[in-house]
Amino acid sequence: MKKKIFIALAAVVVLFSIVFTGCSGGVSQGKYDQIVDQLADAESQLTQAQNSLAALQAEKDDLDALYQDTITQLSGVTQQLNELQAQYEFIGLTDAEIAEQIVINYEASHLYERDVYDCNNMASDVWNMLKAQGIDAVIVVGSVEYIITDIVQSDHAWVLAEVAPGEFLALDATIGHAFTPETGSRYFRGWSFANPADLKINDDLRTEYNAHVVFRNLLNNEANIAAGLYSNSTTQAEADKWLSLYDKLKELKDDQEALAINLMSQILALATEL
């Protein structure tokens, strides 16, 4: 920018020279040619300065991009260092203190997103972190808001960490909090799974189970309608038609019911009721 101003000033000085010379009676051809050469040189310098500025701007853009990449890399390194620091901070702590610190740290650095990265995923992560510290744990499904009697009614998942022989802490990764039986009794009721793999199988089985139950209920409703139409038939042919439909719907309903019962037995075989 300074070079541009200098060149502009130089051009102005030359122009003023022309004006002043003209007032005194005109400019000789030689002097005129010299001035033209000076102007051409000034324009050349201006073009070079503009090109240099463009090159510097491109270099600045490259440096900005490199800076952003470096910041991103440093962020990743910082996170790794924080995780390592957190591990070292466990030195000298009891298993109960380690378990509580794990769930607090985890919740502070992870975002719950329903049906995307929810309680099942988060409980599996905390289970894994406890195992890395040599602490036995299981993953539990159930409800901390309602009293339920069926595993398929479960609406939440958390971890039970064995912090001493026969002594457990319930760790809810979605809120970053640890509970004892005295402070969170509902966390100690439910169905437990030995590891995240069994929990994942349970989730898949429950999805299939729910689909069969929905279809079974739909078929049952249709069968009831057919039964009503059969009861209100006015002719034998009409009665036979609705009875045949009822029998077919009931057969399909019974098939879906049998599949659901089989899936439920698989679900219960994976889980241990607390």
Image: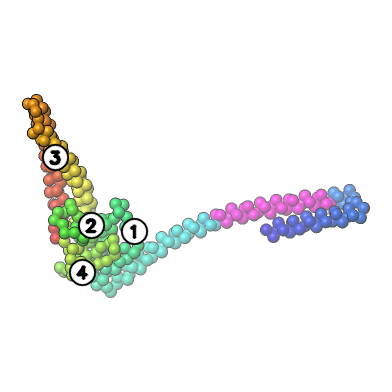
* Amino acid type for the residue under numbered disc 2: His
Report the residue at 57% width, 56% height from top. Answer: 60
Instruction: Identify the amino acid type marked 1.
Output: Leu
In the image: residue 263, left or right of residue 44: left
First of labels 4, 3 by sequence position: 4
User: Residue drawn 29% across and 72% down?
Assistant: 91
Q: CA distance from mark 2 to mark 3?
A: 30 Å
Q: Which mark is residue 111?
A: 1
Q: Earlier in the sequence, mark 3 or mark 1?
A: 1
Q: Which residue is mark 3?
A: 220
Nearest to N terminus: mark 1 or mark 4 = 1
Quadrant of the rendered image containing residue 245: top left
Magenta-drawn segment: 34-62
Residue highlighted by disc 4: 183
Residue 250 part of the magenta segment: no
| Viewer-nearest of discs 3 and 1 | 3
Q: Residues within 10 Å of mark 1 (few under 14, many from 20)?
A: few
Examine the rendered structure and indicate whether residue 2 appears above or below residue 93.
Answer: above
Q: Secondary structure at mark 3?
A: helix
Picture coordinates of residue 98 (x, y %)?
27, 69
